[in-house]
Amino acid sequence: MDIKNQSEKLTASSITVGWREWVKLPKLGLDAIHAKIDTGAKTSALHAIDIETFGPIDRPKVRFGVKPIDANEDLVIYCTASVIDRRYVTSSNGESEFRTIIQTELAIGDESWPIEVSLTNRENLMHRMLIGREAMDAAQLVVEPSEDYLLEKLSFDIYKNVKTQSPVSRALRIGLLTMEPDNYSNQQFIRASEEKDHVIETIQTTSCYMNINSLTAGLHYNGQQLPRFDAIIPRIGAQITSYGTSIVRQFDMTGALCLNSADSIYRSRDKLLAHQVMARHGLPMPITAFASSPKNTEDLIKLVNGAPLVVKLLKSSQGKGVVLAETKKAAESVIDAFRGIDADFLVQEFIGESEGSDIRCLVLGNKVIATMRRSAEPGEFRANIHQGGSAEKVKITKEERQMAVKAAKAFGLSLAGVDILRSNKGPLLLEVNSSPGLKGIAKVNDKDLAQEIITYIENKLFMPKRRNGKLRSKP
């Protein structure tokens, strides 16, 4: 029975409630929970952890854990419900979050009726559940703001003999979104996934097409609908960033965990936007300038303290489209040439004291898991390994480590290659890469980085949350 029909069957008289009440969610096995009755919120929300979508693409379900007892992190009850929607919900502090929406039965006092509930982490809030205006209107609830617990008095004692449950660990279906399945990094992801008994499938990005729908947001591939994936590892080439990020966004709408989000990838790929993000977050970087008018060439050069300077195409990777102009005349020639082909580019201060080397930090989550120093070959200023540079392991400073983690977080990247220059002014952020290669950095660190990344994905899907710095044991 839908919400509208059920609400019509409720008593015509209103129900007076306090600003908070004991409630039940019987279909979820939650027989006592504190709920705040909030006239300022439109939708209802339930504190949930380990949210995992599964099932057919057109009839998705969701598993999630609930800690029903206030200030008690030990008892976790795992629930399953059908997904009726996935949408952005704006919280009272103005932050928007893309949430899974379920329909379940709410019982207060002698009345019960179906309501829509969004699943979100409310561990830092006082009440594990919030009842919004939509649910209140369906039952004609009238709130007495100066009172609480006016109706049935329940007790958390009902959970005394209930044992905490564990999230369901299982083989994952992982999608590797790439146009180069045979390259080293992708082969390492495939090996690491299979060693952990997960199913990993390579998906050619440009062969995907989309069914755009709020609930059955499916993807099709070579004439067939793709199954639901638990996680997506995006490895999108710079040439197809726009289409690739739209595909990642669509996977996110199906409930898949995307290692890096579409927006975070796009921010890192647009070099102009990337430098604006760096500046907004107070990350030190070489002086950078951008202009579109040829009349500004001379002033553009002055802004970066003159030659020598570096000119970078906005759409470039692996050191391609990056030119060192050693004199003012050379700089003017390169800038005029790029403008002549209608290319967008940046002009950047040249950091000579770095002596053709930079530091690559591989950031995973909130941690730097590997580092290397890349040095350019003789006569070359670009340290990229793809340009013939060499690599060696390097010990980074605390300041460099903090900068790398802050940079990845500024872009919203869970996995990032952060490039840093050592200068006379201290470390400078050069670039943040959303699809870092693993070959060179794995070799010099003698680490199985692909395995660490797959473990990170497992933990995001299955591992209970940290509390007070301690991690509860995995089932």
Image (cartoon, rainbow, N blue to C red):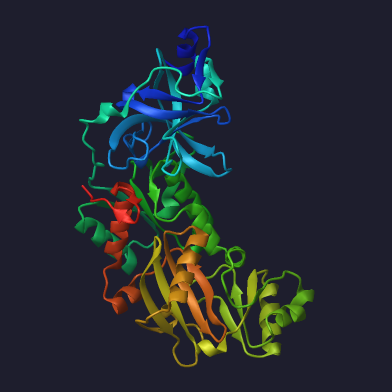
In screen coordinates, is 185 left or right of 266? left
Among all residues in the image, which is located at the extreme front? 146
Q: Looking at the image, which residue is at 41% across and 43% down?
A: 123
Asked if residue 128 is positioned above or below residue 188 in the image, the reply reads above
Indicate the quadrant where residue 126 lies: top left
Asked if residue 173 is positioned above or below residue 14 in the image, the reply reads below
Asked if residue 96 is positioned above or below residue 26 in the image, the reply reads below
Indicate the quadrant where residue 149 lies: top left
Which of 55/426 is in front?
426
How far across and how far down the image is residue 244, in percent?
48, 54
In screen coordinates, is 261 left or right of 289? left
Q: How many marks?
A: 0
Which of 164/433 is in front?
164
How far across and how far down the image is residue 100, in percent?
43, 36
Q: Quadrant of the N terminus?
A: top left
How far across and how far down the image is residue 365, in percent?
39, 60
Answer whether residue 434 is visible to the viewer in this image. yes
How far across and how far down the image is residue 75, in percent?
28, 38
Which of 68/44 is in front?
68
Answer whether residue 201 is visible to the viewer in this image. no
